[in-house]
Image: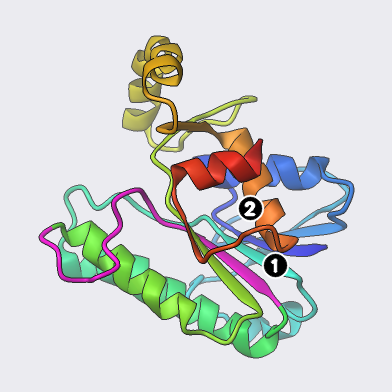
């Protein structure tokens, strides 16, 4: 498989990239972003773009891919709805619309979040915008599109968040992970499981277009 990866430097993207590199069925991973991913390996390449939502100037480099793993996103904390929508909805749909035109045989996976509002009518701003984004992606003419809604993700194998506040939060929460596994199964998954799950979906393993935490765990092993 040839894979496009957006958000390779983020926590989810790092986990996905690791599993792509380890998978013998993946022949190439191209990391799309504003700056180099910093990852090294025979399979890995970088495609630098000024705006990940506008891929017109690099269309020649986007042909022939089997899957796109879109792990790019921001927290809504402190953002206006207009700014959050521009990054979360507009940028994602800009990239996905181009990819659907160039690679209709592609499987597109999008990482949203637990609690996303598919009705687009709820009181939570981030959930509405994410829901609108999911719905729009599912209407695009990809071979398949799948929405991932993780909850708490435990970073593994040196995967770490770029955000200092999140790194501190994960450090503080580490002793709680074992308790969550024991007393709240189905709420915690690992970055490794996320990576394996998106690869499974790219191979056609998903039976439905929206995957909740328990579905991701089942696919990711």
Residue 47 highlighted magenta (yes or no) = no
Q: Secondary structure at mark 2?
A: helix
* Residue at the farthest left position: 123
Q: Sequence order check: which comes first, mark 2 or mark 1?
A: 1
Q: Kindly indicate the quadrant of the structure image that contains residue 46.
A: bottom right
Q: Which residue is mark 2?
A: 198
Total numbered circles: 2
Taking the image as shown, residue 15 lies to the left or right of residue 67, namely left
Taking the image as shown, residue 195 lies to the left or right of residue 136, namely right
Residue situated in front as seen by the camera: 109 or 36? 109
Residue found 64% across the figure and 66% down from its top:
68
Residue found 23% across the figure and 65% down from its top:
128
The crowding category of the residue bearing disc 2, from other C-alpha atoms within 10 Å (few below 14, some 14 to 19, many at least 20), is many
**Which quarter of the rendered picture does the C terminus lie within?**
top right
Q: Are marks 2 and 1 in contact (CB under 8 Å)?
A: yes
* Residue at the farthest bottom position: 101
Residue situated in front as seen by the camera: 216 or 45? 216
Residue found 40% across the figure and 70% down from its top:
134
* Residue at the farthest front position: 207
Tell me which secondary structure the magenta stretch mostly adopts.
Answer: loop
Taking the image as shown, residue 84 lies to the left or right of residue 39, namely left
Residue 104 picture location, percent across and down: 68, 85
- Highlighted magenta segment, given as a residue range: 106-123
Taking the image as shown, residue 161 lies to the left or right of residue 85, namely right
Q: Kindly indicate the quadrant of the structure image that contains residue 203.
A: bottom right
Residue 9 picture location, percent across and down: 56, 46
Residue found 24% across the figure and 70% down from its top:
119
Q: Which residue is mark 1?
A: 67
Residue situated in front as seen by the camera: 37 or 82? 82
Q: Kindly indicate the quadrant of the structure image that contains residue 107.
A: bottom right
Residue situated in front as seen by the camera: 218 or 101? 218
**Distance Cα–Cα, label 2 vs label 1:** 9 Å
């Amino acid at each position: 498989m040839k894979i496009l990866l957006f958000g390779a430097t983020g926590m989810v993207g790092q986990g996905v990239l690791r599993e792509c590199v380890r998978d013998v069925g993946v022949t190439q991973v191209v990391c799309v972003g504003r700056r180099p991913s910093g990852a090294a390996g025979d399979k890995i390449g970088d495609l630098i773009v000024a705006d990940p939502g506008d891929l017109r100037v690099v269309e020649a480099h986007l042909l022939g891919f089997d899957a796109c793993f879109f792990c790019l996103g921001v927290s809504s904390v402190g953002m206006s709805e207009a700014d959050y929508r521009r990054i979360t909805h507009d940028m994602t749909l800009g990239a996905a619309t181009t990819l659907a035109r160039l690679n209709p045989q592609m499987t597109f996976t999008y990482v949203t979040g637990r609690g996303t509002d598919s009705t687009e009518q709820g009181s939570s701003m981030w959930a509405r915008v994410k829901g609108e984004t999911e719905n729009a992606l599912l209407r695009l003419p990809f071979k398949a599109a799948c929405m991932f809604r993780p909850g708490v993700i435990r970073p593994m194998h040196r995967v770490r968040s770029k955000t200092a506040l999140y790194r501190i939060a994960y450090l503080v929460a580490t002793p709680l992970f074992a308790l969550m596994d024991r007393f709240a199964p189905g709420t915690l998954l690992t970055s490794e499981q996320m990576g394996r799950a998106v690869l499974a979906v790219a191979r056609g393993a998903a039976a439905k277009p929206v995957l909740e935490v328990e579905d991701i765990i089942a696919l990711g092993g």
